[in-house]
Image (cartoon, rainbow, N blue to C red):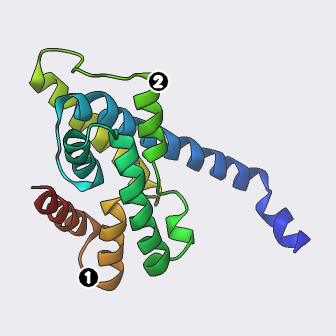
Amino acid sequence: MLAQLKKHLTLHELWEDAKFFFLLNLGLVATAVGIAVFKTPNHFAFGGTSGLSIVLATLFPRWNVGAFMWFINSALVVLGFVFLGVRSMGWTIYSFFVSLCERVCPLSAPLTSDAFLELCFAVILSAVGAAIVFNIGASTGGTDIVAMILNKYTSMPVGRALMVSDLGIVLVGA
């Protein structure tokens, strides 16, 4: 056991772990900022758990988007543990970052009066953040988990599976 621990505590392994955590948090923060600062104040509900959470927070203003994301993502993480195992589900919840953004920078209105500019930032930040997270083999949670399950048990690529799972959430929220 000690030999295995020493094997994993090499300088190279520590560097790889540090790089992984840096990229993971960079991607999660970018995605969370896109949701909390641009999607939520504009009521941009594109799909997925963030879109459903934005719709629910609008219908039930007593709860914020981050709270709904905690509830929905928690249920999906349980599904992920069951179908994908612990290793692939270790880094899935970014609801914490969304809640943190909502707490640190509470917005009741959009930053600008230009809806197109707000839309561009909402899409770009969320997409770049998610791409960083997916590229290192992690997940932002939510419908990503459904897509990973579909990918594991079918021949459907993750991108197409994500599109199918997001469309399902959009239809549920409609």
152 over 35 or under it: above or below: below
> Tag on residue 104?
2
Spatial CA distance of label 1 from label 2 is 42 Å
Residue 4 is situated, as x and y percent measured from the top left of the image, at 82, 71
Residue occupying image coordinates x 46% and y 77%:
84
Q: Nearer the viewer, residue 57 or 132?
A: 57
Residue occupying image coordinates x 80% and y 57%:
9
Q: In this rendering, does residue 123 appear at all? A: yes
Q: Nearer the viewer, residue 114 or 1?
A: 114
> Tag on residue 133?
none
Q: Nearer the viewer, residue 44 or 64?
A: 64
Q: Nearer the viewer, mark 1 or mark 2?
A: 2
The quadrant holding residue 151 is: bottom left
User: Does residue 130 appear to the left or right of 113 in the view shown?
Assistant: right
160 over 47 or under it: above or below: below
Q: In this rendering, does residue 141 appear at all? A: no
Mark 2 surroundings within 10 Å by alpha-carbon count, few (fewer than 14), some (14 through 19), many (20 or more):
few
Residue 3 is situated, as x and y percent measured from the top left of the image, at 88, 71
Residue occupying image coordinates x 49% and y 43%:
96
138 over 51 or under it: above or below: below
Residue 70 is situated, as x and y percent measured from the top left of the image, at 42, 52
Q: Tag 2 or tag 1, which sits nearer the N-term?
A: 2
| Dot 1 amino acid type | Ser
Quarter of the picture containing the C terminus is bottom left
Q: Which residue is mark 1?
A: 155
